[in-house]
Image: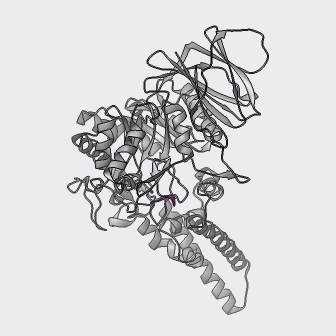
Amino acid sequence: MQEYLTTADRSSVLTPQPALAFAPETPGDAGPVIRIDPKQSFQSIEGFGYTLTGGSADLLMQMSPERRHALLEELFGKRSGDLNISELRLTIGASDMVRQLYTYDDMPFGRTDPELRHFSLAPDRQSILPVMHEILAIRPDLHIMASPWTCPSWMKKGISHGSRDFLSGDSRRILMAFLFLLAGLTVTALAVRGRRWTASAIIVATSLVVLFTAECLLGLLFLLRDHPFHRTHGHVTGDFLNVMQDDDMWPKGRLNPVYIGRDAQMAGGMIHVLAAYTASVLWLHASDNHTTRSGMLAPRYYDAYARYLVRYFQAMQQEGIPIESMTIQNESEENFNNPSLAWNAEQQRLFVANSLGPELQRAGLKTRIIIYDHNADHIAFPEHILADPAAARFIDGSAFHLYAGSLENLSKMHEAYPAKNIYFTEQMVIEDTRNGVPWPATEPIRRIAIGALRNWSRDLILWNLASDSEAGPHILEGGCRTCLGAITIDGDHVERHLGYITLAHVSRFVPSGSVVIASNDTMPSGLGNVAFRTPDSGYALLVTNEGPAQGFRIVCEGREVRATLPHNAAATFTWN
């Protein structure tokens, strides 16, 4: 048995250790035991990898051709010591990790293109396409998934383009708040002028002050969230606002004041909080619906958007880049990021059943449809879609992230719909410190890699492949400012980070086509683990130790190996 060790201080990183010898099992020995049962198998593995953002591709193209090719060989090659990336997620149009936003059919304000006469892959020809061609020359069997961050802005629901959706749900909330503000100011002004404070005037004025104060506080939170000094993207502020914007938190048909501040923020930032309360009411909401940030796909463009996605798959196929699978939307319920497009489960169900599924079928494409592609805290979203046979017949499975929720919910999703696949399609893994000590690799390896693979995920795709030393490039009007890539690239200089180590502990040793096999839960003793049978009839076992330094036994088919791991160490064990 071979062991590849990463220690907490990273003095060893996937370092080969002296070979371990098997011996007959000795039942009754004390101490933790990882017991592997190859006869009990679970999901097959599609692949391991990252998202190739436009920013990642730009940084790769800025390297010298020789150094870039050597790096891509290391990342996608199958030689001993290569990272062996076997799956890659592409962005359909721009993500937030780019220098400039784009889709493949951008139009001037006020114009539409439902026939897609202006569709073009031109924005990808500078970096994405040449990098993909070079990668596929190295790794022709690469699995490729693609996800959109937004549709073209002219497809979005709102008051632009003379839309019939002028009084959509959010618009009504905004208009109600605006009218309430005017009424409150009028009543207050009349009361002050007449020096008579009637009961109704006091109620209205008090309500106005409360709403105004709440809006200022919420506006300040939005402002801080987009400010470059705010470094906790998606944590306290994001979680608070996500809860506050849940429609279920508010009585139906009544004003939810949070929408006002949200729309102010969506417009691209606030000049100051006071102006946001009034100026956002109409103008900012209108501009939101012709920008890449948030908004919803207008139902009248469902078919056009389905054709847009199919056109992308066909164009990529012509470039020699086959897209095997796609998610409907990156982070379906995200409406703060730029770019983004908000969906609810019912909208996604209708889109798949009536537009995208039939359009893919007519085009004869084999691209698999994967729904949701967001956090593990809301499996009711994909469950709602899969409950409809008309949509479910087109759907391969559901995809999840882990910025909220528990990966045990993936197993609940599998139990509810065992015929549908589970995928883990994004998680940011960044460098951090605890009391001045680098964050141990055991944390993301156990929480993300072991967690996803022990809960039915067929893949493990982490977030951005490459960034610069400042966690860019990203757009100025939004975008993640802490999303350090698995590697950083500065000219020809490359550094490998925690996201690289996390993936390497599985990608180097577990090829596509491997199968997750049964192993007992050893977390009570501080040991996390997941086991695999590889296509060549070999075995791999990933173990983390978050407890004190300890010895343990690995038992498989009547034989055992005795191993030890230091505190906060991780190791991958392989044998035939």
- Measured as percent of width and height from the top left, residue 292 is found at 40, 60
Residue 470 within the magenta-colored segment of the rendering: yes
Query: 383 or 556: nearer the eye?
Result: 556
Left or right: residue 459 compared with residue 14: left
Query: 256 or 77: nearer the eye?
Result: 77
Residue 16 within the magenta-colored segment of the rendering: no
Q: Is residue 529 visible?
A: yes
Asked which quadrant contains residue 157, the reply is: bottom left
Q: Is residue 384 visible?
A: no
Q: Which residues are magenta?
A: 469-473
Looking at the image, residue 530 lies above or below residue 367: above
Question: Residue at the spot x=24%, y=36% of the render?
Answer: 363
Query: 233 or 135: nearer the eye?
Result: 135
Asked which quadrant contains residue 257, the reply is: bottom right
Query: 271 or 527: nearer the eye?
Result: 527
- Measured as percent of width and height from the top left, residue 232 is found at 62, 58
- Measured as percent of width and height from the top left, residue 65 is found at 31, 51
Looking at the image, residue 385 lies above or below residue 519: below
Question: Residue at the spot x=61%, y=38% of the render?
Answer: 12
Q: How many marks?
A: 0
Q: Quadrant of the N terminus?
A: top right
Looking at the image, residue 444 lies above or below residue 254: above
Left or right: residue 480 compared with residue 358: right
The secondary structure that dominates the magenta segment is: loop
Looking at the image, residue 28 lies above or below residue 74: above
The scheme the figure's colours follow is: one colour
- Measured as percent of width and height from the top left, residue 338 is found at 46, 60
